[in-house]
Amino acid sequence: MTAELRELRPEDSDALRGFFADVPSDDRTFFKEDISDAARAGERWIAEQRSVRRLSFEGDGAVVAFHAVAGCRAHETRRGLAPAP
């Protein structure tokens, strides 16, 4: 499988919503932010400059992973990878 890794864009809200809708409810607790409203979360993530968030897409446009690196303090970061369920 070959996937394209790129930053979030405003036009990704539908793909992001679809991806997070497939995340089992028990696994949603692993996200720092509330992903029940993926469109709103996506808007915040696109606008926020302190963290790095990326999506991995298959050739057909399906999101296969969500990546995040968030700065907490000068000496620490939080990293996360959420593969498609």
Image (cartoon, helix red, strand yellow):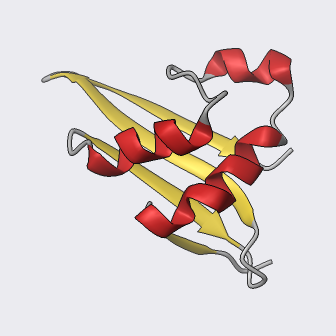
- Apparent side of residue 41 relative to residue 2 in the rendered image (left or right): left
| Residue at the extreme left | 74
For the point 55% across and 63% down, the residue is 12
Residue 26 locus on image (x, y percent): 83, 16
For the point 68% across and 48% down, the residue is 17
Q: Is residue 24 above or below residue 30?
A: below
Q: Is residue 5 above or below residue 69?
A: below
Q: How many marks?
A: 0
Examine the image and state in which quarter residue 21 appears.
top right
Residue 5 locus on image (x, y percent): 53, 70
**Can residue 7 be seen?**
no
Please tell me which residue lies in front, 19 or 51. Answer: 19
Q: Is residue 62 above or below residue 39?
A: below
For the point 67% across and 27% down, the residue is 36
**Can residue 18 be seen?**
yes
Please tell me which residue lies in front, 38 or 3. Answer: 38
Examine the image and state in which quarter residue 59 appears.
bottom right
Q: Quadrant of the N terminus?
A: bottom right
Residue 54 locus on image (x, y percent): 47, 57
- Apparent side of residue 43 relative to residue 80 in the rendered image (left or right): left
- Apparent side of residue 17 relative to residue 48 in the rendered image (left or right): right
- Apparent side of residue 84 relative to residue 37 in the rendered image (left or right): right
For the point 71% across and 22% down, the residue is 28
Q: Quadrant of the C terminus?
A: top right
Residue 72 locus on image (x, y percent): 26, 21
